[in-house]
Amino acid sequence: MGTAAEIITARVRDRVREEFGEPGRRGGAGRIAREEVRRYNERALNDTTPLIDDEHGMTSEVLAAVTGFGAIQPLLDDPSVEEIWINEPTKVFVARGGVSELTDVVLGEGDVRDLVERMLRATGRRVDLANPFVDASLPDGSRLHVVIPDVTRRHMSINIRKFSARIRDLGQLVAAGSISYQAAEFLRASMTAGANLLVSGATQAGKTTMLGALIASLDPALRIVTVEETFELAPGNRDVVAMQCRQASLEGTGEITLRRLIKEALRMRPDRIVVGEVREAESLDLLIALNSGLPGLCSIHANSARDAIGKLCTLPLLAGRNIDSGFVRPAVASCVDLVVHCELDRSGRRRVAEIIAVGGSGESHTIEASTLFAQRDGELRATGRFPLNDAKYRAAGISLASILAVGER
């Protein structure tokens, strides 16, 4: 005889399968779970079975087991939790406010395997000995990353970076203290002018959130095509096409890479192209797209804004021997207008550390860059400098003198 939770969960799972065919309809399963919890207590009144004191808590536990993700479902439902990672069944961590902590959640080996299988069920992706890594998007938009033994020592490693709908635009970033009002207005004007922006930073520095906020500042009538390894961006614009990569099949066919998606995006009449992140040779295809006159946005891992430019000059060389720096550097100098560098400080606060303007011919060994905004005394402030090339702003009728005036907040 199992526990009350096990008995009720089994009943709910059977009823959900009978009524819906697949235990994935959370609304219908919730109704069934409430009915079964009440039925259990009604039966308990007639025998010696202990009553369930907290019917609501039991319903939530059963629902998590049937349609959710078991013991970690409360962490997924907790809005204060930004990321969840499982190093081993007895070590489940979360990040709140950028600070990590060990939870009291304890799983079994079977629970972890079942959790991974359930998360991947609806994604069309797999993880096995031939493919020991997997990236996927959960139904709520959260990003899942799994690594299995023998790449890891003994246990599966699971990371879930939760999708946050809390910050959607530049105004909310200002309210959160991540960027100054003046810098936000400058970025808004830059998006209107059709500037090409590169968002840089370390992992969890807020790059994706910044990309989403920049997209939200665009004219709703513009057609946007987003390209990502796994879906993370969720633009609320009217005319959006979102695409993600696809793994190869068991036969080794059917793989769709970022390079392929960027090329396909150019055939879809975009007004803006957004690449979630460049890591390898796809950076070459992005540069070619931006040099064709198509405005775009992209993120990249880097330690600083200038390091991001250096990295973008290096990654395209991975595309092949026929690509050299003599082509790449001028291309970067001519098509990248701004770099917005984000950082996660020791207190867990995410903020914009600097904004630089890129310009020059790129024919020398270095690309010219001018710092427009920098952190001073804990605030992002204008430096008094202007973009090296303001042609796009002038064409859009935007006066930078008033926006970039020193002393404005």
Image (cartoon, rainbow, N blue to C red):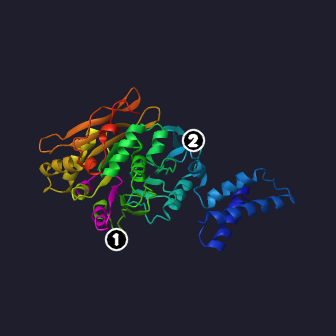
The x and y percentages for residue 263 are 27, 64
**Chain-order first, disc 2 or disc 1:** 2
Q: Which quadrant holds residue 352?
A: top left
Of residues 129 and 183, the one drawn nearer to the viewer in this rendering: 183
Quick check: is 267 in the magenta stretch?
Answer: yes
Q: Is residue 147 above or below residue 81?
A: below
Name, please, the residue furthest toward the right.
46
From the top left corner, tell me how far across and down residue 30 is, in percent.
67, 62
Badge 2: how crowded within 10 Å, few (<14), some, or many (20+)? few
* Foreground of the two, 105 or 384: 384
Instruction: For mark 2, give the secondary structure.
Output: loop
**Does 97 sit left or right of 65 as displayed?**
left
Q: Residue at x 75, y 50 (%)?
A: 54
For badge 2, the amino acid type reads: Thr
Magenta part of the protein: which range?
261-284
What residue sits 52% from the left and 43% below the top?
94
Q: Is residue 367 part of the magenta span, yes or no?
A: no
Q: Residue furthest top?
A: 377
Specify the quadrant that holds the C terminus.
top left
| Percent position of residue 378, x then y | 41, 28
Residue identifier under label 2 = 103
Q: Residue at x 59, y 52 (%)?
A: 73
At mark 1, the secondary structure is loop
